[in-house]
Image (tube, grey):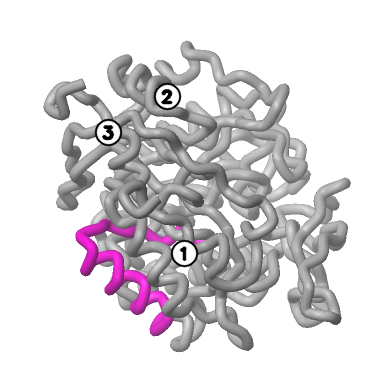
Amino acid sequence: MPEQHDPLFRPLTLGSLPLPNRIVMPPMTRSRASQPGDVPNALMAEYYAQRASAGLIVSEGTWISPLGKGYAWTPGIHTPAQVDGWRLVTDAVHAAGGTIFAQLWHVGRLSHASLLGGQPPVSSSAIQAEGVNVFVAEADGKPGFVQASMPRALSVEEIRAVVDDYRQAAGNAVAAGFDGVELHAANGYLVNQFIDSNANDRGDQYGGSLENRLRFLGEVARALVQGVGGDAKRVGVRLAPLTTLNGCVDADPETTYLAAAKLLGEIGVGYIHIAEADWDDAPHMPLDFKQRLRAAFPGILIYAGKYDGARAREALDAGWADMIAFGRPFVANPDLPARLRQGAPLAAHDRDTLFGGGAHGLTDYPALQAA
């Protein structure tokens, strides 16, 4: 297909940021941060720079405060050393011509006391995420999975402090050279634990009615806009309307997430990043729902969920998506946009090297010419 007619390679403007194509590298946890301190490093900088031909990179989830951490060896954006480490990454991506947002992450109840200095995780409510495992470092230094600990409910005063943590994290991301930030409000993490009805049994202004369950999302999104300096287009939000991942389920997800999209449109955020459920026998996201999200939200809509080149082009041509995120394909195909442009075969990734380790399985996948 001639490039000027290929919807994947039509340029796009996100606020004041010119993006060369519609291909997004979405957040993917790789657990390579340096220890102690969970500090981003030169290896991570090389990994992201290799993939800078994406129209937009969103970093792996990076936790905003010590109680926001849920998995071993994941990077934070909380300490000066972490901010300095992320600057290595953003400098490398920018030198390679890329644009990168930081995904800001608070896992809430999806953590374990061993990761939190012995403290219980925090959540909207004292409801355990049954059957959900989190990734910890065993005594021998190897990764292992354990049941998430029983959480305690945040007080209203503590909720306000968490909103401040998000504001500070957005400021830290700007200081680290990121072009913007994405709020992780999906996949059962803290913001999702307020939104979804079965994870929130609060009786105060943060629970019960839909308006109350969306209150935390709105407060955090506004805090991020303040944290990045007032430009709402440099804030994106990831939502997962139909996912039941990590134990979050909503009684009426279409109503809930259309209201969330409308709220985020009023705040003026630059994009919503929709994570479609993408496991075998996952709930299907109806086309009608996607079209109603398009009508509810005036900004850029990004979709992720097992897209290939053909499905991505169909979505862009249909108009309910503006950009498409390709997660797993970016692991083993650092030059994924070039491969999609040419219709070239995609390399398969090694599942055993996804989490933890060093360069093997992170930066040693060859580009097409080298392969």
Nearer to us in this view, 129 or 328: 328
Q: Using the image, determine if residue 19 lies above or below residue 262.
A: below
| Crowdedness near tag 1: few (<14), some (14–19) or many (≥20) residues, C-alpha within 10 Å | many
Residue 220 in the figure: left or right of residue 248 = left
Q: Quadrant of the N terminus?
A: top left
Whether tag 3 and tag 2 are in contact, CB under 8 A, the answer is: no
Query: What amino acid type should be assigned to the residue bearing mark 3?
Result: Arg
- Residue at 65 percent across and 62 percent down: it is 355
Residue at mark 2: 293
Residue at mark 3: 341
**Is residue 120 located in the magenta-colored stretch of the structure?**
no
> Quadrant of the rendered structure where residue 320 is?
top left
- Residue at 25 percent across and 58 percent down: it is 98
Q: Which mark is residue 85?
A: none
Q: In x, y percent, where is residue 141?
A: 78, 79
Q: Indicate which label's residue lies in the foreground, 1 or 2.
A: 1
User: Which residues fall within the magenta stretch?
Assistant: 83-105
Dot placed on the residue nearer the N-terminal end, 3 or 2: 2
Name the secondary structure under disc 2: helix
Query: What amino acid type should be assigned to the residue bearing mark 2?
Result: Leu
Nearer to us in this view, 350 or 210: 350
Q: Which mark is residue 363?
A: 1
Q: Using the image, determine if residue 186 lies above or below residue 114.
A: above
- Res 235 seen here: no
Q: In x, y percent, where is residue 163?
A: 51, 64
- Residue at 28 percent across and 32 percent down: it is 342
Nearer to us in this view, 172 or 156: 172
Name the secondary structure under disc 1: loop
Rounded to the nearest angstrom, the CA distance separating label 1 from label 3 is: 22 Å
Q: In x, y percent, where is residue 59?
A: 44, 59
Nearer to us in this view, 196 or 324: 324
Residue 50 in the figure: left or right of residue 13 = right
